[in-house]
Image (cartoon, grey):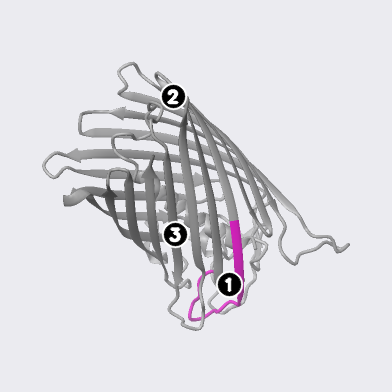
């Protein structure tokens, strides 16, 4: 089902954002020397929609990934990751939220996805070049992606410039949908993306980063499993992200502050502010509390939930998907890490996500949408060798 993969990508995207913010402050996207040791890591993620109506068994996601990195010949490294996730629960056919005045239908869904990522990096005295390829498949969705990224640092290693790009192709075969001849309906989507960034050491305690991103896609963006959903076949987006890491000598802790602005041709404008604080404690423990707030405007073709239940959208494009509505969201989390015998690292993380229409910075949220809550649990273990 296509609606579920979209949901999973939102979930995984949030998890990846959190992981990026958790990078050690001493190496924030800098060109590094070739690694001397390899790494094997395992991650498990459990996600659960939390619905106030006990009659609805909302979406659950269980995902695990295994990552391995090995140095080669002192100048190369190869990294591969395998991810397997499954989704189950009730997926609304017209709305992903419920109001007291309008209840949409819901159907039981079960989805499984497998993905493999491969990256090869060449290290130079002042930079790196990485080539990557990824492939993911599920019963009605296949995605292939190819990427390249390079970095170059100044002679004093205080500034690093980064540039990269990717090309992705998606093939969609909605379950149960056929043409007039009875053949399975097939759709496709093609997208390109680029990134430019600069990271600079300001002082012994401060590191800042600025990234600019752009993506352009053509093809099928419609969610075929939702009623009343027709979207444009082109989408462009731009992002600006800034990060600032500051180390506190007194507590030996590090704060990580970031801001991200997003805009696209669907009409969505989004702001995200995130803060983490990394605090080492006794016996090789580390505690990392975090908070993230995001707010977005509605897409130009979002159709608000009708209070009387009568759906009569106008215009060429329209969608009742609440993910395209105006809302604000707050995520609070806590992560605990423990280093064991130098080569082992274990961690556990809990996050609670709450989304409200009236939390949107610019107002205009759909008042008929019910509040949405979700929680994340993540467990991990890694070993150097």
Which tag, 3 or 1, sits closer to the chain's start?
3
Q: Is residue 381 magenta?
A: no
Q: Kindly identify which numbered label has been placed on residue 45.
A: 3
The foreground one among 272 and 62 is: 62
Left or right: residue 208 versus residue 50 is: left
Can you tell which mark lies on residue 74?
2
Residue contact between numbered discs 2 and 1, judged by CB atoms under 8 Å: no
Q: Is 109 in the magenta?
A: yes
Segment tinted magenta in the rendering: 94-113
Classed neighbour count for the residue bearing mark 3: other residues with Cα under 10 Å, few (<14), some (14–19), many (≥20): many
Residue 335 appearing in the image = yes
Mark 2 or mark 1, which is nearer to you? 2
Q: How far apart are marks 3 and 2 (CA)?
A: 33 Å
Locate residue 3 relative to residue 183 in the image: left or right.
left
Q: Where is residue 171 in the image (x, y as percent from the top left)?
A: 70, 50
Task: Point out which mark residue 48 bears.
Answer: none
Q: Which residue lies furthest to the right in this view?
A: 181
- Image position of 368 (left or right of 350): right
The mark lying in front, picked from 3 and 1, is: 3
Please tell me which of labels 3 and 2 falls first in the chain.
Answer: 3
At horizontal 86% and vertical 63% (from top left) the residue drawn is: 180
- Label placed on residue 92: 1
Q: What element carries label 3?
A: strand
Asked whether the beta carbons under mark 3 and mark 1 sit within 8 Å of each other, the answer is no
Compared to residue 166, the image places residue 296 above or below, namely below
Helix, strand or loop status at disc 2: loop
Looking at the image, is 157 positioned above or below residue 217?
above
Q: In which quarter of the image is residue 309?
A: bottom right
Residue found 68% across the figure and 60% down from its top: 139
């Amino acid at each position: 089902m296509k609606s579920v993969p979209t949901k999973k990508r939102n979930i995984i995207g949030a998890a990846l954002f959190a992981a990026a913010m958790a990078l050690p402050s001493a190496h924030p996207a800098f060109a590094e020397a070739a690694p001397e040791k390899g790494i094997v890591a395992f991650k498990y993620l459990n996600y659960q929609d939390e619905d106030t109506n006990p009659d609805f068994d909302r979406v659950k996601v269980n995902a695990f990934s295994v990552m391995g990195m090995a140095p080669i010949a002192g100048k190369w490294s190869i990294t591969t990751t395998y991810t397997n996730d499954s989704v189950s629960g009730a997926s609304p056919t017209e709305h992903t939220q419920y109001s007291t005045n309008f209840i949409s239908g819901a159907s039981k869904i079960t989805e499984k996805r497998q993905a493999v990522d491969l990256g090869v990096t060449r290290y130079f005295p002042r930079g790196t070049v990485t080539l990557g390829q990824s492939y993911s498949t599920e019963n009605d969705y296949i995605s292939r992606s190819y990427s390249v990224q390079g970095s170059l640092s100044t002679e004093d290693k205080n500034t690093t410039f980064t540039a990269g790009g990717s090309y992705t192709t998606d093939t969609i075969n909605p379950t149960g949908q056929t043409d007039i001849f009875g053949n399975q309906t097939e759709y496709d989507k093609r997208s390109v993306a680029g990134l430019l960034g600069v990271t600079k050491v300001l002082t012994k305690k401060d590191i800042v980063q600025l990234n600019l991103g752009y993506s352009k896609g053509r093809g099928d963006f419609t969610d075929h499993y939702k009623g009343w959903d027709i979207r444009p076949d082109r989408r462009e987006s731009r992002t600006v992200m800034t990060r600032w890491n500051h180390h506190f000598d007194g507590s030996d802790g590090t704060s990580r502050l970031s801001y991200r602005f997003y805009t696209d041709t669907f009409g969505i404008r989004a702001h995200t502010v995130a803060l983490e604080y990394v605090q080492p404690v006794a016996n090789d423990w580390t505690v990392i509390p975090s908070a993230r707030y995001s707010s977005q405007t509605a897409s130009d073709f979002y159709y608000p939930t009708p209070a009387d239940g009568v759906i009569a959208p106008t215009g060429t494009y329209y969608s009742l998907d609440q993910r395209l509505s105006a809302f604000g969201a707050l995520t609070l989390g806590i992560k605990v890490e423990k280093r064991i015998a130098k080569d082992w690292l274990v961690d556990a993380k809990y996050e609670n996500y709450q989304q409200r229409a009236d939390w949107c910075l610019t107002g205009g949220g759909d008042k008929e949408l019910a509040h949405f809550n979700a929680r994340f649990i993540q467990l991990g273990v890694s070993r150097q060798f």
